[in-house]
Image (cartoon, coloured by chain):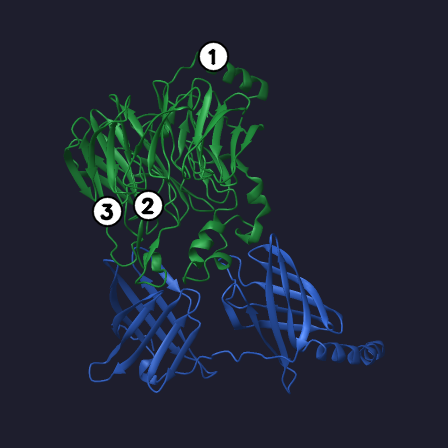
Amino acid sequence: MRRTMLALLFFLPAVSGAAQGLEGRWDGHIRIPDRDAPMIVDLARDATGAWSGSIILPGLGVKGAPLANIVVTGNEVAFDLGTVLSTPGDGPARVKARLDADDRMTGELRQAGNAAAVSLTRVGAAQVDAPARSTAVAGNLVDRWTGQYELGGYPRQVSLTLENHANGAATAKLVIVGKQTTDVPVDLVVEEARLLRVQSQAYRVVFEGRLREDADELVGTIEVGAFELPLVLRRAAGRAS
Amino acid sequence: MKPATAGLALAVFLASAGAGAQSTFRGDAAHSGVYATEAPRQLHRIKWRFPTGDRIVSSPVYANGVIYFGGDDGNVYAVDATDGRQLWKRATGGPVPATPAVAGGTLYVGSYDGKLYALDARSGVPRWKFATQGERRFEARGIHGLQPKTQTIADPFDVFLSSPVVAGGAVFFGSGDGNVYALDAASGALRWKFRTGDVVHASPAYADGVVFFGSWDSYFYAVDAATGVEKWRFHGGEDPVFHNQVGFQSSPAVVDGVVYTGCRDSNLYAIDAATGKERWHFGAAGSWVVTSPAVAQGKVVLATSDSSLYLVLDAATGRELVRKQGKAFVFSSPAVAGSVVLVGVLNGTLEARDLASGELLWEYQTEASKRNDGWVLTAERRFNAAMLFWSTWREAPIVAADRQFQVGSIFASPLIVGGVVFFGSSDGNLYALE
């Protein structure tokens, strides 16, 4: 125990100093074969010591995507890129980097089983993009809703199941059945001014609608890629809640 | 088979073979996709590799000891089958993603310059050329959900040109101008043309005096070869919004009175050749069937694009006999040689499978696929969509499709002659494997 305490006494200042040294805006590149992809990472720590971060990938359409699972150990940092660059079966892309000098980090990005070197230089203070967060939805929306839209001459059956959680945020399960069954991964569920928005960034699908209480219907539109179509959702026979 | 034995077999074959069944797309005028030789059940070596200046989409054909194919670099090539030595090349005015047909000492092939060329097969010297109304790719507003949705965008996956078929002294081929043409094979004079509603890049098949072909207008046609008069038409699926699930890009095979054709509406159709009535269809659950089916031993062999399935169906009923999950999209048409099926994959891999079981016997991965520039592929050789198709805006999806094909993608249907496998790749090489 005494040995552990001594070790901590020596180690803690180093950890603390290095951790502070990871804050900031980091600008650099991913050395993908035949393609140097620019990458900008913002890392910040709040008053409680919790880390947050976001990433910009110019050329890959990513601006301010939130980082997930940020782990800082000494002068090393590891984080997931969330849904950005994630692939089915391989999970999220992940960066591990190490502070080499005051303003320089090197490391590795792993994505879809591929690995590439990453080099980053601190260029200023962190400018973390605050991620959009899901909210709770009104109690009378918590249910399973079904409806149908037609696209390209084929009907698509939609099932939307909304659920509130103790953390004050709702989640949604969205399933679209056309020629095949698609379980759409939902990133965001927000109800603002009685407008419900259910969004899947990865699949470019958005449902927006309002509850028409007299008919007990969710009336709105569904965006599928470049196309926006009217969609009316009705309560499924068996209530989910 | 040992390399030396394979070499001897090829030499014997080349000495005895004349212009024959390997001299047209899919092996014969009916496009059966069957080759009268046994493909290697084990890969021994690359026999030779012939580099060109751009990707190769055209499938190779064989006649009198020579391999012929087109290049997207605009040339038509003649290469010695034994050693890969160039015999001649002839420039056209555009890329040549069509497969040539060789008959009576003449090679026939179309180019993106909108012309059909008849070249002397020995020298490459032009005999005649015929100008269509001009080539174009399939295009539509909002195609595949691309933006802006009110603007016409050409389909980056419309990669092939129609390959000619020669029968009864005529050359039959489709064109981006929407017509199927019948020309006199000797003079290039127009015999007739048949107007469809959209691009015809599928290759016509010929059987019993009838020409069979599909168009991007959603119809499949049977036309009298002598007169150009329509005998029947068959309606595939339509997709007026995305224009994704529509059109016959696949070329038909006609075997024992049945036409087998894939369709972008995600079906493989078996159609009665005499009446045009559907016998059965096989649904590929939303995935294009671009490959032209091979029909052998009462089985239909095909592969799908997005779902990357390798399938063997009962030719009489459409019942599924074999299903194997592949890794990436398949546009290459399977070729059957004895007990082996060869098929190219867009991830830059050539696969050899056992016809009976569908099990993978061997595979060859191109160097470009191994390099995986720009992480086009995952480590498992699946397409890395997150790195490719992150935007639907402007030219981004077109550029992404081009990048997708830079891993040595194999569009070509393999050719098997004397136990040697020939195929082209988007890395610009024509390969001979044994």
Select label 3 or label 2 by which is in front: 2
Which residue type does callout 2 highlight?
Arg
The image shows residue A40 at horizontal and vertical percentages of 60, 70
Q: Residue at x 40, y 29 (%)?
A: B336
Circle 1 SS class = helix
How much space separates mark 1 and mark 2, taking CA atoms?
Answer: 41 Å
Position of the C terminus of chain B, as image quadrant, is top right
Instruction: Name the residue located 32 percent from the left edge and 81 percent from the top edge.
Output: A141
Among numbered discs 1 and 2, the one appearing first in the sequence: 1
Q: Which residue is mark 1?
A: B15
Is A90 placed left or right of A188 in the picture? right
Q: What number is the disc on residue B136?
A: 2
**Residue visible at 46% across and 41% down?**
B345
Quick check: A214 left or right of A97? Answer: left
Report helix, strand or loop for mark 2: loop
> Badges 1 and 2: C-beta atoms under 8 Å apart?
no
Figure check: B231 above or below A232 = above
- The Cα–Cα distance between marks 3 and 2, rounded to whole angstroms, is 14 Å
Host chain of mark 1: B
Earlier-in-chain disc, 3 versus 2: 2
- The answer to which of A90 and A45 lies nearer the viewer is A45
Residue B129 x %, y %: 33, 30
Chain under callout 2: B
Q: Are marks 1 and 3 in contact (CB under 8 Å)?
A: no
Q: Is residue B105 above or below residue B53?
A: above
What colour denotes chain B?
A: green
The color chain A is rendered in = blue
Q: In the image shown, does A211 or B375 lie closer to the viewer?
A: B375
Single out the mark in the foreground, 1 or 2. 2
Question: Quick check: B407 left or right of B232?
Answer: right
Give the amino acid type for the residue marked by disc 1 in the picture. Answer: Ala
